[in-house]
Image (spheres, rainbow, N blue to C red):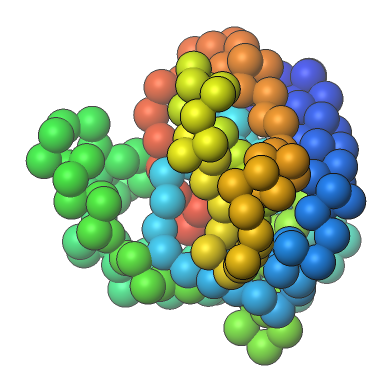
Amino acid sequence: MTLPARDSELVQIMDASLADAARRAGPWLACRMGCTQCCHGAFAINALDAERLHAGMDALRAADPELAAEVARRAQEWIDEHGPAFPGDIETGEIGASIEEQERFEEFANDAPCPALDPATGRCDVYAWRPMTCRVFGPPVRVDEEDAADADALGCCELCFVGASEEEIAACEMAVPHALEDELLAETGAVGETVVAFALLR
């Protein structure tokens, strides 16, 4: 699989939306390099995210082979440690689709640091190619797109907007182009999900 040509457009829209939300949030947004709460715990990523990480690792190998090798080493260690409990196909890295496997994934590797995280600096070593979940963590984003009037449908990092009112939080909502992402994902024809560690080693 290769990334759809418009994936770069999706990333640009996301980056611009994040920058706009951060500008409006000001000091309410606590996200800084070295704050790594969102970098712990396994989460599902789609085929676009996985392919973007794969492309990022190719770029990193060309630009900084030693760093790429270190990221790959951490990813392999992650799989060696957590793979035996992975609720899916350990060979492909695809998360199982059954109800039982989905329930197991909810409790899977919840405290594990992401292998892309440099533990010494708190920096993401594949930041430019990070998944969409990483790009929306922090600012208020809509949990349920269909309920635009419900303030409770907005979620944000628990470290951000401490003491802010519902109105102040709502004023900093980050727009997310879900429709474009869905369209590009449909172009790939891929339906399965994986986790970052497997994508880094593809």
Residue 132, image x, y percentages: 62, 41
Q: Is 151 placed above or below 59 here? A: above
User: How many marks on residues?
Assistant: 0
Residue 22: % across, % down: 82, 52
User: Which residue does the image show at 61% across and 67% down from the upper left?
Assistant: 162
Image spot of residue 67 (x, y percent): 74, 72
The residue sitting at 54% across, 71% down in the picture is 37
Looking at the rendering, which quadrant does residue 97 occupy?
A: top left
Q: Is residue 1 in view?
A: no
* Camera-nearest residue between 90 and 185: 185
114 lies left or right of 140: left
Q: Is residue 95 left or right of residue 68?
A: left
- Identify which residue is drawn at 71% across, 31% down: 175
Quadrant of the rendered image containing residue 65: bottom right
User: Residue at 76% across / 27% down in the picture?
Assistant: 10
Q: Is residue 93 above or below residue 9?
A: below
* Res 172 → quadrant: top right
